Image: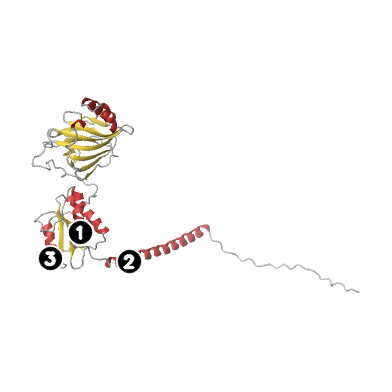
């Protein structure tokens, strides 16, 4: 007979595991730990960046030591002459002759011993040259005479950028006994340079002094604080303007006329040559709601409210909102300036109140009437209208 499988009693065993208390960190403690870990990570990254920067500096120092010497002084002569010509607005040559005692200017020197160059402004080029001759490296020097202090500073800045672009190794001659300046000179942007001696009423082209008693007092009324500073830059003169057909000059007064170049009626601005004859005087006191650009082609003029003089070859930017009084100095028989005027020209009285206005449409009407009168035809002006 088949055996039956033995029957096994089942039982349930309950095992109780002792509960272990797990310490729980507060939210504030966990936040502090997270911040600490983040700081540690940043510190590590900062350290790596510092090491990279140090390696780059070391590589730059090594490359600097391996630089070739500066080019011969003769080849750098053209660089100094070119930069001086751009700064002074006239062809200028660099000289290696002995400068006169007390001549101020800008110098460029090169030591024969190690080929390093030096440059800077000097109030006495003769003293600078003597120091160069006493240098153990037997330095040679070229120079440009520049009387204006601000122009010297601007030219040195231009020269420094040129030497840096050429990767020229330099040495500082001022670390020795030479002192090239008695007083610190304010750095001047090479593109933004004021023209004329500040505060001087003297005619820069002759010994005669300007009679300012006949002029009204400079405008001292309200000027919006948002008005920016004017810009004036020396530029090369384009030459004589005597070949312009006299019929093209549109008269506004007995001594003032303009020659239209562009009358933009769609955008409300005009470009013209303004000509003033008669030996000088007050032209107008006015204000511009829009910007004005000017380029002096002949003669010179200034504003009573500023201490600069716009001479032949100068570029002028006039910011919107400024009220100023245009004056042509005595002795200037003819002044011609190219003006780009946006918006109307608001003529003001001595208190700055607007008494008259002139815009591109007034210029157009004057030109049409004049060209019809001189036989060119009113439609002659159409070529300038846009």
Q: Secondary structure at mark 1?
A: helix
Of the image marks 1 and 3, the number of the one nearer the N terminus: 1
Of the image marks 1 and 2, the number of the one nearer the N terminus: 2
Q: Looking at the figure, which quarter contains the N terminus?
A: bottom right
Closest to the camera, between mark 1 and mark 2, is: 1
Instruction: Inspect this view and state whether residue 341 appears.
Output: yes
Q: CA distance from mark 3 to mark 2?
A: 34 Å
Query: Which residue is painted at 21% across and 54% down in the image?
Result: 156
Q: CA distance from mark 1 to mark 3?
A: 22 Å
Query: Which residue is painted at 76% across and 67% down in the image?
Result: 12
Checking the image for residue 76, the label placed there is: 1
Q: Position of residue 49 (x, y in %)?
A: 39, 63
Q: Secondary structure at mark 2?
A: helix
Q: Residues within 10 Å of mark 2 (few under 14, many from 20)?
A: few
Q: Position of residue 54 (x, y in %)?
A: 34, 65
Q: Quadrant of residue 136 in the image?
A: bottom left
Q: Are marks 1 and 2 in contact (CB under 8 Å)?
A: no
Closest to the camera, between mark 1 and mark 3, is: 1
Q: Secondary structure at mark 3?
A: helix
Give the residue pinned by disc 3: 134
Note whether 59 is above or below 88 in the view shown. below
Pick the front one: 319 or 367: 367
Q: Looking at the figure, which quarter contains the C terminus?
A: top left
Q: Quadrant of residue 179 in the image?
A: bottom left
Q: Residue lying farthest right? A: 1
Indicate the colouring scheme: secondary structure
Query: Which residue is painted at 26% across and 32% down in the image?
Result: 345
Note whether 33 is above or below 343 in the view shown. below
């Amino acid at each position: 007979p088949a055996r039956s499988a033995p029957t096994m009693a089942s039982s349930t065993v309950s095992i109780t595991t002792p509960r272990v208390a797990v310490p729980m960190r507060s939210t504030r403690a966990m936040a502090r730990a997270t911040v600490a870990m983040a700081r540690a990570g940043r510190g590590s990254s900062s350290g790596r960046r510092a090491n990279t920067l140090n390696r780059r500096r070391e590589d730059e120092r090594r490359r600097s030591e391996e630089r070739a010497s500066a080019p011969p002084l003769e080849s750098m002569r053209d660089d100094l002459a070119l930069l001086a010509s751009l700064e002074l607005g006239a062809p200028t040559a660099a000289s290696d002759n002995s400068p006169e005692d007390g001549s101020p200017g800008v110098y460029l020197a090169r030591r024969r011993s190690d080929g390093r160059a030096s440059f800077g402004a000097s109030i006495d080029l003769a003293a600078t040259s003597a120091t160069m001759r006493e240098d153990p490296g037997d330095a040679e020097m070229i120079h440009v005479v520049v009387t204006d202090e601000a122009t010297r500073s601007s030219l040195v800045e231009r020269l420094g950028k040129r030497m840096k672009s050429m990767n020229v190794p330099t040495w500082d001659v001022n670390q020795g006994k030479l002192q090239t300046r008695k007083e610190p000179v304010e750095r001047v942007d090479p593109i933004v340079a004021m023209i004329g001696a500040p505060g001087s009423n003297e005619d820069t082209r002759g010994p005669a002094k300007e009679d300012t008693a006949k002029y009204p007092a400079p405008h001292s009324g309200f000027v919006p604080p948002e008005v920016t500073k004017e810009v004036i830059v020396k530029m090369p003169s384009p030459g004589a303007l005597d070949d312009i057909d006299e019929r093209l000059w549109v008269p506004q007064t007995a001594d003032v006329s303009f020659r239209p170049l562009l009358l933009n009626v769609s955008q409300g601005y005009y470009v013209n040559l303004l000509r003033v004859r008669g030996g000088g005087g007050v032209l107008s006191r006015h204000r511009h709601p829009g910007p004005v650009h000017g380029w002096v082609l002949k003669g010179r003029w200034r504003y009573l409210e500023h201490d600069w003089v716009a001479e032949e070859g100068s570029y002028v930017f006039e910011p919107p909102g400024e009220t100023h009084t245009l004056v042509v100095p005595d002795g200037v028989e003819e002044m011609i300036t190219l003006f780009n005027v946006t918006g109307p020209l608001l003529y003001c009285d001595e208190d700055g109140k607007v008494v008259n206005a002139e815009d591109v449409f007034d210029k157009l009407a004057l030109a049409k009437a004049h060209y019809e009168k001189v036989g060119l035809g009113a439609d002659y002006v159409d070529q300038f209208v846009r």
